[in-house]
Amino acid sequence: MIRFDDSAREKMLEHAKLDFPDECCGFLYGTEDAEGARQVLETAVVNNAKTGDKRRRFEIGPKDYMQAERYAAEKDFLLLGIYHSHPDHPAVPSEHDRVAAQPYFSYIIISVMQGSIDHVRSWRLNDEARFEEEKTETTHFHQSI
Amino acid sequence: MATVIIPTPLRKFTNQTAKLQVAATTVEEVIHSITLDFPDLKKHLLDDQGKVRSFVNIFAGDDDIRDLQQEKTVVGESTVLSIVPAIAGGTSF
Protein backbone atom coordinates (compact mmCIF):
# COMPACT_ATOMS: atom_id res chain seq x y z
CA MET A 1 0.00 0.00 0.00
CA ILE A 2 1.23 3.46 -0.86
CA ARG A 3 -0.60 6.58 0.26
CA PHE A 4 -0.07 10.12 -0.94
CA ASP A 5 -0.15 13.37 0.92
CA ASP A 6 -2.62 15.46 -1.12
CA SER A 7 -0.23 18.27 -1.96
CA ALA A 8 2.52 15.85 -2.94
CA ARG A 9 0.14 14.04 -5.27
CA GLU A 10 -1.20 17.26 -6.75
CA LYS A 11 2.31 18.54 -7.47
CA MET A 12 3.18 15.28 -9.25
CA LEU A 13 0.02 15.33 -11.38
CA GLU A 14 0.49 18.98 -12.33
CA HIS A 15 4.00 18.13 -13.46
CA ALA A 16 2.70 15.31 -15.65
CA LYS A 17 0.16 17.64 -17.29
CA LEU A 18 2.66 20.47 -17.70
CA ASP A 19 5.23 18.30 -19.47
CA PHE A 20 2.70 16.58 -21.77
CA PRO A 21 3.29 15.37 -24.48
CA ASP A 22 6.75 14.63 -23.07
CA GLU A 23 7.33 12.19 -20.26
CA CYS A 24 7.99 13.75 -16.88
CA CYS A 25 9.82 12.21 -13.94
CA GLY A 26 10.46 12.85 -10.28
CA PHE A 27 11.21 11.44 -6.85
CA LEU A 28 8.97 10.22 -4.04
CA TYR A 29 9.99 10.92 -0.44
CA GLY A 30 8.27 9.71 2.67
CA THR A 31 8.03 7.02 5.30
CA GLU A 32 7.34 3.32 5.62
CA ASP A 33 5.80 1.69 8.68
CA ALA A 34 6.63 -1.68 10.22
CA GLU A 35 4.02 -3.40 8.03
CA GLY A 36 5.56 -1.91 4.89
CA ALA A 37 2.82 0.65 4.24
CA ARG A 38 4.29 3.68 2.52
CA GLN A 39 3.32 7.32 2.87
CA VAL A 40 4.54 9.80 0.27
CA LEU A 41 5.03 13.15 1.99
CA GLU A 42 6.86 15.02 -0.75
CA THR A 43 7.35 14.68 -4.47
CA ALA A 44 10.19 16.39 -6.30
CA VAL A 45 10.25 17.44 -9.93
CA VAL A 46 13.36 16.28 -11.78
CA ASN A 47 14.57 17.19 -15.23
CA ASN A 48 13.98 14.49 -17.84
CA ALA A 49 17.59 14.12 -18.93
CA LYS A 50 16.82 11.86 -21.86
CA THR A 51 18.35 13.11 -25.08
CA GLY A 52 16.15 12.35 -28.03
CA ASP A 53 12.51 11.36 -27.87
CA LYS A 54 11.20 12.52 -24.49
CA ARG A 55 7.68 11.59 -25.56
CA ARG A 56 8.51 7.92 -25.06
CA ARG A 57 11.45 7.90 -22.70
CA PHE A 58 12.70 9.40 -19.47
CA GLU A 59 16.02 9.37 -17.72
CA ILE A 60 17.23 10.83 -14.43
CA GLY A 61 20.83 12.00 -14.38
CA PRO A 62 23.16 10.41 -11.81
CA LYS A 63 23.91 13.73 -10.08
CA ASP A 64 20.19 14.41 -9.65
CA TYR A 65 19.92 10.94 -8.14
CA MET A 66 22.82 11.53 -5.74
CA GLN A 67 21.24 14.83 -4.69
CA ALA A 68 17.93 13.03 -4.04
CA GLU A 69 19.64 10.53 -1.73
CA ARG A 70 21.32 13.39 0.14
CA TYR A 71 18.02 15.26 0.46
CA ALA A 72 16.26 12.19 1.84
CA ALA A 73 19.01 11.71 4.43
CA GLU A 74 18.92 15.37 5.48
CA LYS A 75 15.15 15.36 5.91
CA ASP A 76 15.11 11.94 7.55
CA PHE A 77 12.85 10.68 4.77
CA LEU A 78 13.09 7.50 2.77
CA LEU A 79 13.60 7.77 -0.96
CA LEU A 80 10.59 5.62 -1.75
CA GLY A 81 10.70 5.62 -5.50
CA ILE A 82 10.21 7.33 -8.80
CA TYR A 83 7.27 8.69 -10.70
CA HIS A 84 7.02 9.16 -14.43
CA SER A 85 4.31 9.74 -16.98
CA HIS A 86 3.15 7.78 -20.00
CA PRO A 87 1.73 10.32 -22.44
CA ASP A 88 -1.18 8.81 -24.37
CA HIS A 89 -0.31 5.37 -23.03
CA PRO A 90 -1.72 3.29 -20.16
CA ALA A 91 -0.24 3.44 -16.65
CA VAL A 92 1.37 0.05 -17.12
CA PRO A 93 5.13 -0.53 -17.08
CA SER A 94 6.84 -1.21 -20.38
CA GLU A 95 9.64 -3.71 -20.87
CA HIS A 96 12.00 -0.74 -20.84
CA ASP A 97 10.63 0.25 -17.44
CA ARG A 98 11.14 -3.29 -16.14
CA VAL A 99 14.70 -3.76 -17.38
CA ALA A 100 15.88 -0.53 -15.75
CA ALA A 101 13.83 -0.90 -12.56
CA GLN A 102 15.37 -1.14 -9.11
CA PRO A 103 14.25 -3.38 -6.28
CA TYR A 104 12.43 -1.77 -3.36
CA PHE A 105 11.35 1.37 -5.24
CA SER A 106 7.72 2.18 -5.90
CA TYR A 107 7.28 3.15 -9.53
CA ILE A 108 4.34 5.48 -9.97
CA ILE A 109 3.14 5.69 -13.56
CA ILE A 110 0.79 8.48 -14.55
CA SER A 111 -1.20 7.96 -17.70
CA VAL A 112 -1.86 11.31 -19.39
CA MET A 113 -4.38 11.06 -22.20
CA GLN A 114 -4.63 14.09 -24.50
CA GLY A 115 -3.27 16.29 -21.76
CA SER A 116 -5.55 15.08 -18.95
CA ILE A 117 -4.69 12.71 -16.10
CA ASP A 118 -6.30 9.35 -16.73
CA HIS A 119 -4.89 6.81 -14.26
CA VAL A 120 -2.22 6.73 -11.58
CA ARG A 121 -0.87 3.31 -10.66
CA SER A 122 2.06 2.07 -8.61
CA TRP A 123 4.29 -0.89 -9.39
CA ARG A 124 7.11 -2.68 -7.58
CA LEU A 125 9.50 -5.40 -8.64
CA ASN A 126 8.99 -8.76 -6.97
CA ASP A 127 11.82 -11.19 -6.18
CA GLU A 128 11.58 -12.58 -9.73
CA ALA A 129 12.23 -9.07 -11.14
CA ARG A 130 8.67 -8.80 -12.44
CA PHE A 131 6.43 -5.86 -11.73
CA GLU A 132 3.50 -6.31 -9.38
CA GLU A 133 0.93 -3.62 -8.84
CA GLU A 134 1.08 -1.91 -5.47
CA LYS A 135 -2.20 -0.81 -4.00
CA THR A 136 -2.67 2.94 -3.86
CA GLU A 137 -5.16 4.73 -1.71
CA THR A 138 -6.97 5.88 -4.84
CA THR A 139 -6.20 4.85 -8.36
CA HIS A 140 -8.43 7.02 -10.47
CA PHE A 141 -7.87 10.75 -10.76
CA HIS A 142 -11.58 11.64 -10.79
CA GLN A 143 -12.18 9.75 -7.54
CA SER A 144 -9.19 11.13 -5.73
CA ILE A 145 -9.21 14.88 -6.19
CA MET B 1 39.25 2.86 4.40
CA ALA B 2 37.16 4.11 1.51
CA THR B 3 33.54 4.95 2.19
CA VAL B 4 30.87 3.41 -0.03
CA ILE B 5 27.40 4.97 -0.19
CA ILE B 6 24.75 2.31 -0.81
CA PRO B 7 21.65 3.61 -2.62
CA THR B 8 18.29 3.14 -0.94
CA PRO B 9 17.05 0.33 -3.25
CA LEU B 10 20.08 -1.84 -2.48
CA ARG B 11 20.10 -1.40 1.29
CA LYS B 12 17.87 -4.41 1.71
CA PHE B 13 20.96 -6.40 0.69
CA THR B 14 23.30 -4.67 3.19
CA ASN B 15 21.20 -5.09 6.33
CA GLN B 16 19.90 -1.53 5.78
CA THR B 17 23.40 -0.11 6.05
CA ALA B 18 23.78 3.10 4.03
CA LYS B 19 27.55 3.56 4.38
CA LEU B 20 30.21 0.89 4.31
CA GLN B 21 33.88 1.30 5.20
CA VAL B 22 36.07 -0.81 2.97
CA ALA B 23 39.82 -1.41 3.06
CA ALA B 24 40.80 -1.40 -0.61
CA THR B 25 43.04 0.38 -3.11
CA THR B 26 40.88 0.26 -6.26
CA VAL B 27 37.18 0.35 -7.14
CA GLU B 28 37.49 -3.24 -8.29
CA GLU B 29 38.70 -4.30 -4.84
CA VAL B 30 35.91 -2.34 -3.20
CA ILE B 31 33.27 -4.13 -5.28
CA HIS B 32 34.91 -7.49 -4.65
CA SER B 33 34.94 -6.84 -0.90
CA ILE B 34 31.34 -5.68 -0.56
CA THR B 35 29.96 -8.48 -2.73
CA LEU B 36 31.83 -10.97 -0.57
CA ASP B 37 30.34 -9.45 2.58
CA PHE B 38 26.90 -9.07 1.02
CA PRO B 39 26.53 -11.72 -1.70
CA ASP B 40 23.00 -10.65 -2.66
CA LEU B 41 24.45 -7.36 -3.89
CA LYS B 42 26.41 -9.09 -6.62
CA LYS B 43 23.66 -9.63 -9.19
CA HIS B 44 22.61 -6.00 -8.81
CA LEU B 45 26.11 -4.63 -9.35
CA LEU B 46 27.81 -7.01 -11.76
CA ASP B 47 26.82 -8.65 -15.04
CA ASP B 48 27.51 -12.27 -16.02
CA GLN B 49 31.05 -11.32 -17.08
CA GLY B 50 31.76 -9.76 -13.70
CA LYS B 51 31.70 -6.22 -15.06
CA VAL B 52 29.76 -3.36 -13.50
CA ARG B 53 26.25 -3.52 -14.95
CA SER B 54 25.29 -0.92 -17.52
CA PHE B 55 22.45 0.27 -15.28
CA VAL B 56 24.85 0.96 -12.41
CA ASN B 57 27.01 4.06 -12.15
CA ILE B 58 29.84 4.40 -9.67
CA PHE B 59 31.04 7.82 -8.69
CA ALA B 60 34.28 8.65 -6.89
CA GLY B 61 33.32 11.92 -5.26
CA ASP B 62 31.61 13.81 -8.12
CA ASP B 63 33.37 11.89 -10.89
CA ASP B 64 31.97 8.94 -12.80
CA ILE B 65 34.60 6.20 -12.75
CA ARG B 66 33.92 5.74 -16.49
CA ASP B 67 35.66 9.12 -16.88
CA LEU B 68 38.55 7.98 -14.67
CA GLN B 69 40.21 4.55 -14.82
CA GLN B 70 36.94 2.62 -14.57
CA GLU B 71 37.24 -0.33 -12.13
CA LYS B 72 40.99 0.33 -11.85
CA THR B 73 40.33 3.77 -10.38
CA VAL B 74 42.45 4.19 -7.27
CA VAL B 75 40.69 4.84 -3.97
CA GLY B 76 42.21 6.27 -0.82
CA GLU B 77 41.31 6.92 2.78
CA SER B 78 39.21 9.94 1.93
CA THR B 79 37.49 8.53 -1.18
CA VAL B 80 33.71 8.43 -1.09
CA LEU B 81 32.31 6.02 -3.66
CA SER B 82 28.64 6.33 -4.50
CA ILE B 83 26.75 3.51 -6.17
CA VAL B 84 24.16 5.23 -8.32
CA PRO B 85 21.46 3.23 -10.08
CA ALA B 86 20.59 4.44 -13.56
CA ILE B 87 16.98 5.57 -13.50
CA ALA B 88 15.27 5.34 -16.87
CA GLY B 89 12.19 4.02 -18.59
CA GLY B 90 9.34 5.03 -20.78
CA THR B 91 6.43 3.81 -22.79
CA SER B 92 8.51 1.64 -25.11
CA PHE B 93 11.97 0.64 -26.31
Image (cartoon, rainbow, N blue to C red):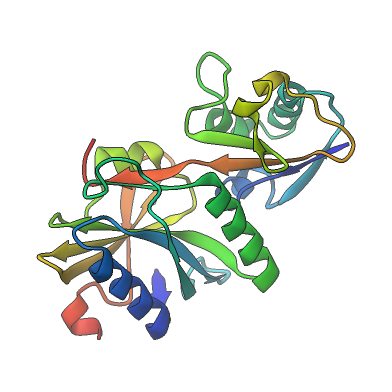
B43 and B84: which is toward the camera: B84
Residue B66, by quadrant, is top right
Vertical arrangement, residue A72 with respect to residue B89, above or below: below
B34 and B90: which is toward the camera: B90
**Residue found at x 12% / y 57%:** A88
A11 and B28: which is toward the camera: A11
A58 on left or right of B69: left
Vertical arrangement, residue A122 with respect to residue B82, above or below: below
Q: Where is residue B30 in the image (x, y as percent from the top left)?
A: 75, 28
Q: Where is residue B87 in the image (x, y as percent from the top left)?
A: 44, 45
**Residue found at x 62% / y 65%:** A72
Please give the count of numbered marks on the rendered protein: 0
Q: Can residue A91 be seen in this snapshot? A: no
B19 and A74: which is toward the camera: A74
Task: State which quarter of the image contains the N terminus of chain A.
Answer: bottom left
**Residue found at x 53% / y 34%:** B56
Residue A20, by quadrant, is bottom left
Q: Can residue A60 be seen in this snapshot? A: yes
**Residue found at x 59% / y 45%:** B10
Q: Where is residue B39 in the image (x, y as percent from the top left)?
A: 65, 30
Q: Position of residue B41 (x, y in %)?
A: 61, 34
